[in-house]
Image: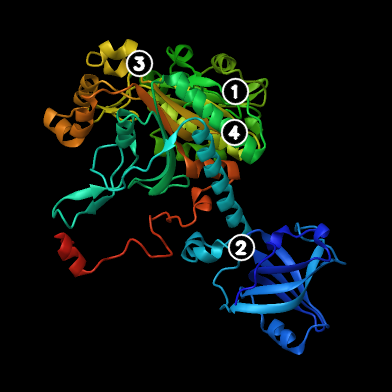
Amino acid sequence: MVFKRTHMCGELRLADAEKEVVLNGWIAKKRNLGGLIFCDLRDKKGIVQIVFDDNISDELREKADSLRSEYVVGVKGAVKERQSKNKDIPTGEIEVFVSDLIIYSEADTPPIYIKDDDNVDDNLRLKYRYLDLRKQKMQNNLTFRHRIAKVARDYYDENGFTEVETPMLIKSTPEGARDYIVPSRVHPGSFYALPQSPQMFKQLLMVGGTDRYMQITKCFRDEDLRADRQPEFTQIDLEMSFVDVDDVIEMQEGFLKRIFKEVMNIDIELPLPRLTYEEAMERYGSDKPDTRFGFELVKLNDIVKSCDFGVFTNALAAGGDVRGICIDGGSAQFSRKDIDKMQESLKSYGAKGLVWIRHNGSEITSSVNKFFSQEQLAEILGVMGAKEGDLCLIVADKAKVVFDALGFLRRDIARKMGLLDDSKYNLLWVVDFPLYEYDEEEGTYSAMHHPFTSPRPEDIERLESDPGSVKAQAYDIVLNGFELGGGSIRIHDRNLQERMFKILGLSQKEIDEKFGFLIEAFKYGTPPHGGLAFGLDRLVMLLAGEQSIREVIAFPKNQSAQCMVSEAPAPVTDDQLDELGIKVK
């Protein structure tokens, strides 16, 4: 038997006083005061206090006495105004006096506490995720995610998009990360891959006349994990025919405005700012800049090119850069020991050192005092816009190392100084990315986004002669230093697509083997098209104020790409391997 619920636990208010209600949920806490038994009853909507008083039968009291934490129960009773109110919970003005109770299931003592601030080890939380999900925060996050997904479906439906499912078992193609591969029993020695994205299939949908496509879909990448990355993740995936960059951006800005208004009750101003890739790197050292604070990069090449400090001059002679950031009020806030720790943290970005200069008014101190006079240091501080009390930090190396190091450092320092205001949402577009990235060690080019990205029309003539100068019709949407999504106008001309593949070092045989089906489709009339994919997990994480996407995914993997609940990945039987024609070394 099941009691038919009339209300959720967290929904009851003082206006419901004197109502007869039926509730179902878990016992969160029990207090036996002799004549009275108080329990907190919890469901996905919240907690309400239930009371067993002196007026109940002996049978009901015996059942109430037996209750323990996490028992699953149903109760019938009357809502009463609470004498001792609890301002910490929304239901704190009322309580429910129980007249009937059913115990659906008993529970052992759980291995983790069911409360938001339990501070339990992450792996233990993930192992018992089904218990962790009972926490109010986790239920709120899942509901929040649902709301964002619903707004996405509603918005794109209203704007003429058709939701289409694309295959999960596809051919392995080079898209940047490692594929997860799946052996075929029917075709021994052959393998499917799980999609890193639906990229080629959504382009084929444009060839097929779908015109506007969307899908909320799983994607898979076998890569190292971090707080905002999982081996399986979810995209809001989009593609549109007969569009240019502005058309795609305008459509996505409308979606973001809708999301912020309906989910956050925040009005964002459109159009959003745009930065070119070059400007983003020059000013912020990152193609996903956080613009909630200053500390912009300052180029010092001209002022130090004739100095006596070899670290600077050698970097410039090798074609590198000397750049710095000025930390407002940083001189008093960061000790020499703090700066040494900063320098150590920059090693992972390839930086060999960190020069510091303190503006202490009449005296300027620096780690390079013996190479620069007070006048020269004052000139550098002037170029960097430093004032008394500021700290300037400088890196000299290859441009990529300088950008990566200072891009990390400016945000890390802002975090330490409490300047990352989570109530502030700075959205912007980064546009005009390079089409290619050059690998100095290999001496080869690779696609910065993917090989289906269209170059700007005015740059096509330089594809072979000067590929490093070619800009892409690509765009990323950035929120507070995180890439929310990215996309591009795609190549729709088969000859241009083959040129792109060949510049990337693919032979005609490799093109035919890996991408032949796409090139074949392009022979039969392909509309110009472009699209974008939002990272749903990351979007939910940022708007929910979480620090990890694991907090907004029901059953995430841990940092070792393991599912702690099901213990995947796991060995399979020899019979299963034999069916697939596979042997494990």
**Residue at screen point 58% across, 36% down:** 259
Which secondary structure, mark 3? loop
Which secondary structure, mark 2? loop
| Nearest-to-viewer mark from 2 and 3 | 3
Indicate which disc residue 258 carries. 4
Query: Vertical placement of 254 versus 83: above or below?
Result: above
For label 1, count other residues whose C-alpha is less than 10 Å away and answer few (under 14), some (14-19) or many (20+). few
> Which amino acid, by three-letter code, is at mark 3?
Arg
For label 3, count other residues whose C-alpha is less than 10 Å away and answer few (under 14), some (14-19) or many (20+). some
Q: Nearer the viewer, residue 360 or 319?
A: 319
Residue position for label 1: 270
| Nearest-to-viewer mark from 2 and 4 | 4
| Residue 184 occupies quadrant | bottom left
**Residue at screen point 66% across, 80% down:** 67
> Which amino acid, by three-letter code, is at mark 1?
Leu
Indicate which disc residue 118 carries. 2
**Residues at marks 2 and 3, CA–CA distance in whole angstroms:** 53 Å
Disc with the residue nearer the chain's start (2 vs 4): 2
Disc with the residue nearer the chain's start (2 vs 1): 2
Disc with the residue nearer the chain's start (4 vs 1): 4
Residue position for label 3: 456
Q: Give x and y (percent) for residue 358.
A: 60, 26
